[in-house]
Image (cartoon, rainbow, N blue to C red):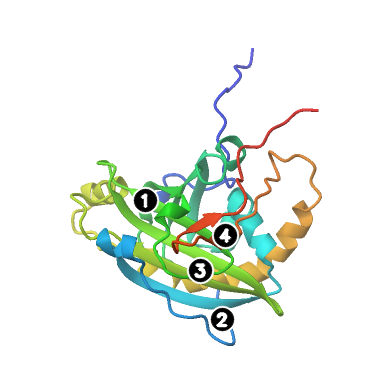
Amino acid sequence: MQETNKVYRSNAGQTYLPFQENIYVRTLPYTPLEKPIPEIQELILNERAKEKGLILQSQSQHMLPGVSAKMLDWFWANMEKGYYLWAPGSHKRFNWVKEPWRVGFVNSVHMISESVGENNPVFGGSGIEIHRLSLSEFPFTTALSHVICEGTFNDLGEFVDSTIHMWEDCEGGCKHITAAVANPNIKEPPHFVKEMLALDPNMKLVPPSSTDHGEYEASRWPVFLPKLYELWENHPDPTQNVQCDLTVMKRDDGSYRYIHTNGPVKVGK
């Protein structure tokens, strides 16, 4: 008799194991995207981020032709459908730890590993847990109309770093910013860094945020996302085709909040 597997993990599909050995795959050639016209105002850390001692590591902006804000909202709630298309040859694994349909968008967590190109070590070891954060953790004074703020933590529960994406509809597509902030005051590195250094103490750690990896990812959205979104647009099961709206509004005190709850999916008659 076949034993039923009661543990289901939503993932991006087939991939090689162990992830760390899968380094002989080329990435695709790409042309970096143009910046929006006019360019978006440079990001500035807000007072809360400054009080925490956070530093702004990087920021870049893009014009995404043919991509709408609604498509990007959908992408972040359905990453398993497009993660390997987002950075072919670079993205090595994806699975949800806490799925948006089950726990809501802000509480969701996914796990990834990725490299920055052929023959480079897989950054993230066996996996990096990435948490979707509340906008109380949003570190900037300004935002575009849609936002996602993601973060990682170490084994002590300390906030390590965050990647923030913002986007907004404009003529011809969407304007987009990606930025990274880090906490230089942590007592120890995150678990995946300890794991990598335990295997090779001399390993040169190259975080994707310090390379052109973000440019590669951004360049891919116009290639695959409109087609993928169209394929799924009328799919009837909301637990498989998760809908969310990541529109934000600014409060009187300068902080931001989501306009919509984007809670767990409820099924029923």
Q: Residue at x 66, y 70 (%)?
A: 223
- Quarter of the image with the N terminus is top right
Identity of the amino acid at label 4? Val
Q: Choose the circle earlier in sequence order: 2 or 1.
A: 2
Find the distance from the CA under tag 2 to the CA under tag 1. Answer: 30 Å
- For label 1, the residue is 152
Outermost residue on the bottom side: it is 38
Find the distance from the CA under tag 4 to the CA under tag 2. Answer: 31 Å
The crowding category of the residue bearing disc 2, from other C-alpha atoms within 10 Å (few below 14, some 14 to 19, many at least 20), is few
Q: Residue at x 44, y 47 (%)?
A: 131
Q: Residue at x 39, y 66 (%)?
A: 180
Residue 146 appears in the rendering = yes
Residue 25 appears in the rendering = no
* Element assignment for label 4: strand
Q: Choose the circle earlier in sequence order: 1 or 4.
A: 1
- For label 3, the residue is 143
- For label 2, the residue is 31
Closer to us: mark 2 or mark 1? 1
